[in-house]
Amino acid sequence: MKNDEFWDQFLDMIHSKLNDISYTTWFKDIKLDSISQNHIIINVGNTFRKKHITAFYMDLIEETIDSISNNNYTFEIICDEDKAKTLEIPIYKEEPEVFVLPKIKDTSSNLKPEQTFDNFVVGDSNRFAQTVSLSVAEQPGKLYNPLFLYGKSGLGKTHLMNAIGNYIKENSNKSVLYVGCDEFINDFTQLNKKGEDNLEAIQQFKNKYRNIDVLIIDDIQLFRGASKTQTEFFTTFNFLHDSGKQIILSSDSSPDDMNYLEERLKTRFAWGLQANITPPDYNLKVNILKNKVIGTEVGNLIKPEVFDYIANNCESDVRHLEGAINRLLALTAMYSPKEINLEFAQENLKEDFNSSMYITNNVTKIQKAVAEYFDLTVDNLKSKKRVANINNARQIAMYICKMTTEETIEKIGREFHRDHSTVLHACEKIDKEIKTNEELRRQIKEIKEKIAN
């Protein structure tokens, strides 16, 4: 059997034994490095993937190789950084024997079933967080414990935490509890209000937060000013961690920036892995929007420039993106337009964006802002000069005019002493470049901020 045939069969069989998410994350991009005599070398790319595959998929790889080959192959996993190194399989210590509280009743997981890995849109800003979250979901309590996700509100932390919980519930018999930090604080506060005769309440509290396999707590920045609750959480954390139970936490900032947290809690959080989620870039925002309308009746009615318009005006918040597209869908159901074009979106989404920008924007104001940004004059932008720096600024100005005003292409052209075809060409050029040019996206964002002020 030829090497490429062997490898195709190997990947197909691996895929048949895993769900699409796990296969795509861990195996889709790995390569057959070499086959010599009875030894196979598999290059998995990076050290992170190597660590995970060698920890959790060695038996699957061995079984797959044996099933498609008559030879007794040995194999090793390498990455780009250690092609010449020998495979080292991590060894995990046995979990300590601990006292487990008796179950009184099954606690609701509180998970949102609609938030899964399948509908979490991945981009550069959240790829690492998604990958480690899937790792935890596949092997809870064994690899990254605790998992600490942090980033500004509305970037997908809650979605990922629910995705982990839903994956674990679907693929194992482990018990999962998802709560907001405010619920934990409230439960503990109510416990103290019951006075000294609260043994039953204490037992109920412990059963809720300790008699589980996976504890997920969202928005732990709410621990600010709750010192007694922090002490109780420290005790709960230790109990679960010593029992080999998975802990997943989220916050709007990293533990190092949470000065109000007890140092011993910060130390515990450092035991596992911290993953930052940053604001989505342009491409991810467009993909999120497109994913939102997949399977809807109006999905085919939306013109590409509408996605561009929303992505360019929702600067950083995924919730803002989803809110804008939801409003557009609702208005579409109300008015039943034949198509959802840029003009329809601009007219109906004014209130979703910075209203002052769209009320006060006009071509003259944009021309002035662009000229000042690039140290030019408005006359330069309107001139016939085709010097590179002037032409570039002119095209950016035309693009911003089209995206943020209600003026027609013809009107914009007249303001720049150009015909409508020149404006269209400029807008198409900038629209294409902005998808891959981070510097251009930054310039346009700064100009728009300048216009809004």
Image: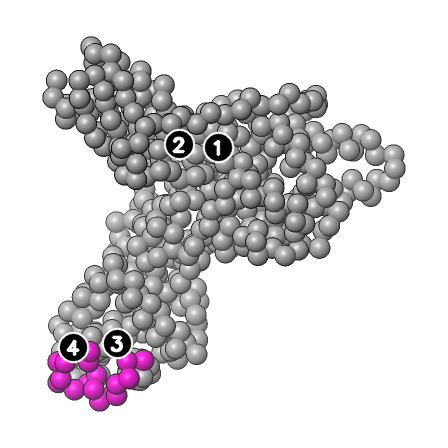
Q: Mark 4 or mark 3, which has the lower sequence index? A: 4
Which residue corresponds to the image point at 19% horizontal and 65% vertical from the top-left? 428
Residue at image mark 4: 388
Which residue corresponds to the image point at 37% horizontal and 24% vertical from the top-left? 57
Secondary structure of the residue carrying numbered label 4: helix
Which quarter of the picture shows residue 453? bottom left
Rendered image: mark on residue 383: none
Check residue 384 for magenta coloring: yes
Check residue 231 for magenta coloring: no
**Label 3 with label 2: CB-CB less than 8 Å:** no
Residue at image mark 3: 397
Secondary structure of the residue carrying numbered label 1: loop
Residue 193 drawn above or below residue 286 = above
* Mark 2 to mark 4 CA distance (whole Å): 49 Å
- Bounds of the magenta segment: 373-391
Q: Mark 4 or mark 1, which has the lower sequence index? A: 1
Residue 124 drawn above or below residue 82 = below
Whether residue 29 sits left or right of residue 186 in the image: it is left
* Mark 1 to mark 2 CA distance (whole Å): 8 Å
Residue 77 vs residue 265, the one in the foreground? 77
**Label 4 with label 1: CB-CB less than 8 Å:** no
Residue at image mark 1: 143
Residue at image mark 2: 52
* Mark 3 to mark 2 CA distance (whole Å): 48 Å
The picture places residue 233, in percent across and down from the top left corner, at: 68, 41
Q: Mark 3 or mark 2, which has the lower sequence index? A: 2
Q: Residues within 10 Å of mark 2 (few under 14, many from 20)?
A: some
Amino acid of disc 3: Ala
Asked if residue 355 can be seen in this view, the reply is yes
Whether residue 423 sits left or right of residue 324 in the image: it is left
Amino acid of disc 2: His
Q: Mark 1 or mark 2, which has the lower sequence index? A: 2
